[in-house]
Image: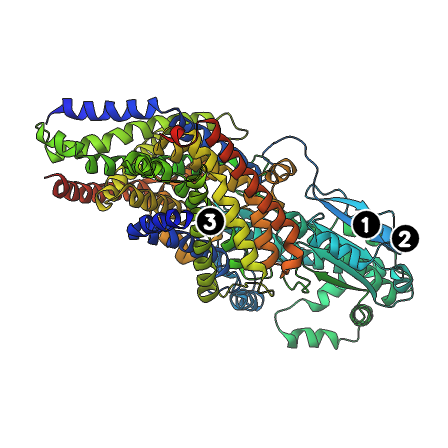
Amino acid sequence: MLRVLVTKDIRRWWSDRQAVVVTLLLPLMLTAVLGISFGGFGGGAPEIEAIPLALVGDPPSLLRDPLDRALAESGLFAPVWCDSAEADRLVRKGEARAAVVLPADLQDLLSSERVAIGVWKDPGSVLQADIVEQILRRGLLRVQGGEAVYLAAWPADGFPSAGEPDPFGDLLEGDSLAAIWRRLRDRSPEVAAARAKLEAILDHQAALHDAFETSAVALTVVDRTGQEAKGVGPSTNMFDYILPGMGVFFLMFAAAAAAGDLHRERAGGTLRRLLVAPLGNSDLLVGKWLFAMLNGLLQLAVLFAAGKLLFRMNLGTDLLALPLAAIATSAMLASLFLPLALLTANEKQMGTISTGVTLFMALVGGNFISVDQMPPALQAAGRFTPNYWANRTFSDIVVHGRGAADILPRVAVLFGIAAALLAVAVAIYRRRGGKAGLL
Amino acid sequence: MNAGVIRALVGLHVRQVAADRASLFWLFGMPMMFTVLMGMMFGDMNAGPREAPELTVFDGSRGPAARGLIEALGGHEAFRVVVADSAGSWETARALVDAGSRTAALHIPAAFDADLAAGRTAALSLAYDPDRASAQTARTVLEEAVLRLEFLAAGRRAAAGFDEARFDALWRDPRITLEVRTLGRLGGEPQPSALAGFSSGFQHTGPSYTLMFVLMFMLMSVRDVVTERRNGTLRRLRLAAASPWLLAVGLFLGPVAVGLVQAAVLLGLNLLLPGMDYGDSPGALVLTMVLFTAVSSALALCIATFCRTPGQADGLGMTASMLMAALGGLWWPLEVVPGFMQKIALALPTGQAVTVFHNMIGRGWGLAGNAGHLAALAAMLAVLLALAAARFRRLVD
């Protein structure tokens, strides 16, 4: 009799083909949107557009040209040189994500004066302006460190303060190598002293260069997959992270719709006819549960197959693990909304409450954002949602490559939740008078 | 025009929504829950003191260089440093991060200080979870501390009279510095938010989830129109001297009225959240919400004319609202997605509306600054209304 009930439900579900297609396509479409947004199509590395950057200053072409070339070749920046008023306008309008304001007199960079380099950030930028700041900070740290180590090693080589005589600087003053060379050839005692200082500085630079040849510390950075991290950010296919969460999320909607079928059958009058059939006491309920579970399994199978074909996602190393997790998840979600279907008055009420419950659980249970990234209180709350255990199980298989033996404890939790919720549904059903209570 | 028919249809829709208590939770409770929880996830949001994720250090060396390194890691808000009692092993460190119980774990081998002192390359290992912002910060801070050790070691090797105290002074107080400021109306305010341009993550999630739930409630109500059509209610109304045009206007304005009340309540409640405001232009705020609500209602009516069963209506309504929310930048700021996805977002009402909110809050723009986006919303409204009216007439006539 159960087989007949389930077959009937599958036929009814299949009769509304457009609804079926939407149910199966929606998770795939959303996964594609999320994946393309953060990982590129086909599981490629995340890509960042060249950041429009305003540069304020008037460096000589000797400095400006290679800087322009380096920025353009990095692919990270699309620089434009302008004055400070134009830079302010560009940044405020969001046409440049940030402006870098160089000192008015670039000579200050090679003096004993304190110098500030300005960074103006676009108020509408949440990422790219920060990238500009971070790259500048990292680069500047090396300059600051270089100056600190040099002056701590050879303090006498420091730049003279403003107003102090600077024979060495005077020696190099000029706009052509020929002029500098002619001054260097001068045999006067002042030039000889400046020349000696230049030689000492070059010797020191060479000594420091040699000292940097040997690395003091070899830092190895390893991410959760055990791979050596080359850059900051997730190291595997983004679809591996996104698709299981989306799959479980939409499976919750499908499970709610399957449980809500009780209301549809009642409104359509078919429930009354079913109840006069020779059914066991809880057959109707168990039949709905079996249908919801098979429906969920089909949805997960389509989703993971499409994920493999379209997004090259990883399905794990153990052939048993994914089917086991899918069965446990489908069983759990099939039970999830049965008690609600028995407690609500009609399909609309059921739909409203189940959608609210689904969205809340998806948010807290880690379907939108990994539970690890949430504040501690929410992390703790997430463990009490059934979908959390499903998300974790799929994540273990797909992201961490774990096998069936490793996921058994979580699978047991999922089956435990499924059994408990089904028992609750049966208890409610019997308490409300069994078959008669359904009408 | 028979204004009475329109008034009756609008009144009926408002009464139906108000009578359903679950709908009221869906209208107001659920969006606020999303706003608060997602706002907390986007950064500090003044949610009260909370413990930062742990970076565990297994210090096998226990020498001065290792201690200096650990000291350099301390004092950051993003993570807290805990030095383990035992020296531990690299495998233990990795297992802790792999299990998700630590954001990162640093292993300093026993020979670390001895190697540094002897001028040999000292090994250091960090296991970290790249999905967590705290781990990324920990990695950056560690790399800076390692860079300092590199400079220090190079200085010692290069010059016999290397002055470590002077190096430390210059490292801590460098001559060339970076002065960073954010332009716009929030430029002078502290920014605990993970969203750099905003002073609070709620400034993104508040408007975003208001827009999303206004749209979602309307699209989830599509099934009501489909059910009424299947039950023959619309045909009966048509026979009661209501023209298709009047029926369409009534079915369009009912959800608009509910949507505007929903938006007003949600935007008002959002103001109770820390650091929340909508900029300096009430006119732009009101016009944006009116246009967005109207566009959502017109879209819902359009979808209703394409669905034959309530099941199809649910599926299409959910698909459209989820996709438009995700693509339009309601789930995450548009700047984090590639350029072509940003262009797609601006082809959607969600993308246009949330961009207006960002411009109002971050840049302080009003009606003039947002004129292009508001015009785009108005154009979408005109197209959708025309399509809905044409389809609706064919259905009920």
Question: Which class describes the residues within 10 Å of circle 2: few (<14), some (14-19), or many (20+)?
Answer: some
Q: Secondary structure at mark 1?
A: helix
Residue closest to the eye, A110 or B301: B301
**Amino acid type, label 1:** Ile
Which sits earlier in the primary sequence, circle 1 or circle 2? 2
Q: Position of residue B33 (x, y in %)?
A: 50, 32
Residue A325 seen in the current view = yes
Mark carried by residue B62: 2
Residue B197 vertical placement versus A235 (above, below): above
Q: Residue at x 89, y 64 (%)?
A: B115
Image-based side of B66 in relation to A333, left or right: right
Q: Which residue is mark 3?
A: A293
**Amino acid type, label 2:** Arg
Q: Chain of mark 1?
A: B
Question: Which class describes the residues within 10 Å of circle 1: few (<14), some (14-19), or many (20+)?
Answer: some
Q: Secondary structure at mark 3?
A: helix
Task: Residue B123: name its quadrant.
Answer: bottom right
Q: Chain of mark 2?
A: B
Check if mark 1 and mark 2 are on a common chain. Answer: yes
**Amino acid type, label 3:** Met
Q: Position of residue A148 (x, y in %)?
A: 78, 56
Q: Which residue is mark 1?
A: B70
Q: Position of residue A82 (x, y in %)?
A: 47, 55
Q: CA distance from mark 3 to mark 1?
A: 52 Å
Q: Residue at x 80, y 59 (%)?
A: B90
Residue closest to the eye, B307 or B148: B307
The image's colouring method is rainbow
Q: Position of residue A18 (x, y in %)?
A: 29, 52
In this rendering, which labeled residue sits more in front, label 2 or label 3? 3
In this rendering, which labeled residue sits more in front, label 3 or label 1? 3
